[in-house]
Image: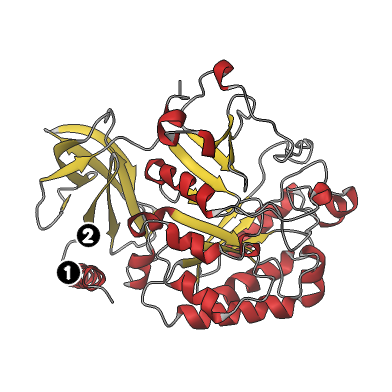
Amino acid sequence: MSPATLRHKALLAAVRLRAATSEHTLTGYIDGTKFDRVIGWAYDTKDPKKRVTVDLYCGGKLISSAVAGQYRADLKAAEIGDGRYGFACKFPGITTRTTKTVSVRVRSTPLLLELNHAEVFDVELTPAPFITYVAIDTVNNCNLRCPFCLVDYSKVTHTELMSEETFERLLTLIDYVDDWGFWMSCLHEPTLHPKFNRLLDMIPRARRKDVLFTTNLARPLDEATFAGWADSGIDHINISLDSMKPELFAVLRKFGRYEVFQQNLDRMASVFRQFPNPPKLRYITMAFKSNFDEITDIIRVSHERWLSYENEIRYTYNFQHIPDEFRNTHYLDKEDWAVLDERLAKLPYNHYVGPPPDEYEEKLQQTIDYDALKLVNLSTRRKIPRPLQLRARPDGKVFAIGHEDVCAVDIRSLEDPPKFFRELLG
């Protein structure tokens, strides 16, 4: 365990002891800054379910406020309530690197949160990132053919692999993404890339906390692969987990075998327990009529057996290529979501339910075929609203999501990728 980790654990223990022995019910701390934001945590020891509000001041002037309700795995591990007490107060108008003298007060109280034992302190701020995320598809294929997948694989005939040279060009963007904004997978299965762990190793260690990837774990993986993940320093891994029933698993995860999936989970959890600070594991479950009564068990087992720090329950995108038979048989009705939310609210585990938007059932979304999109003539491009969301294909073609007709460019052809994408913004 690193000296920094030990100091952090000691700090949390001291704050926890102070909270337990003090007559004051409020406590918290300032951790530092992230771009143009002052970050920290605060909570009420007598009412752990309460989310307090904090105010950021500079020169006696109120600059911004934030609700302390973000989940923090370190707080949860230190047995500080449910861990959902993090906050980020934004300092507006930051266009260049600058230093400000600030203080942070818990609203309607005299409590000033400290940084290095100081209630008033200097922070170094930098402009906010101009890219929300870069979704990198290191391959163009998947080992499964799930009937609800938002990708239409009917035209995919072979697996393309991203080269190290292409990935190295994409890494020039990592300093300009928002929190957890460098995705090592999105549309496809990253473990199909034989050098996926090598790509992880290429990421600068100092920036790996902004990295995540999503996997179905449905193909056999060895301990060495999991050890590479455990020691990678990335923030978290999303794992698809829709059913623990082998027959239903085979339906929802077509071409997948539950016994292989479970062996991977057990092996990964065993390896991760051997490392001091592995990535957090976050489980994603698509909610259907077929697994509706199983979701509570999925959340419980993934927390108790497979190191889950959070479970997300998602709805399925209503894409045109999804078979009507599957849609009619498996999709939840609107009233089902209220029942599910009420049922899961009783669980003592961290979870998030994302119900579908209004008119969801009535609207079909058109499938976007990124393989068919063409590069755009850069001389005719127009400005795009800030911030950017980018998607990268294995061959290096990068698209601005929602503005594919404006920005579709081969990143390998750009002399200065960050400058190019910054100049796209209106």
- The residue lying at 28 percent from left, 77 percent from top is 1
Say whether disc 2 or disc 1 marks the residue closer to the N-terminus. Answer: 1
Q: Which mark is residue 257?
A: none
Q: Position of residue 284 (x, y in %)?
A: 61, 61
When the figure is inspected, residue 92 is found, relative to residue 214, above or below; the finding is above
- The residue lying at 28 percent from left, 27 percent from top is 93
| Coloring applied to the structure | secondary structure
| Amino acid carrying mark 1 in the image | Arg
Q: Which sits in the foreground, 370 or 342?
A: 370
Name the residue that disc number 2 marks.
Answer: 27
When the figure is inspected, residue 1 is found, relative to residue 409, above or below; the finding is below
Asked if residue 305 shows in the view, the reply is no
- As measured in the structure, the alpha-carbon distance from the residue carrying label 2 to the one carrying label 1 is 8 Å
Q: Are marks 2 and 1 in contact (CB under 8 Å)?
A: yes
Q: Which mark is residue 18?
A: 1
234 vs 107, left or right, is: right
293 vs 296, left or right, is: right
119 vs 2, left or right, is: left
Q: Which sits in the foreground, 34 or 337?
A: 34
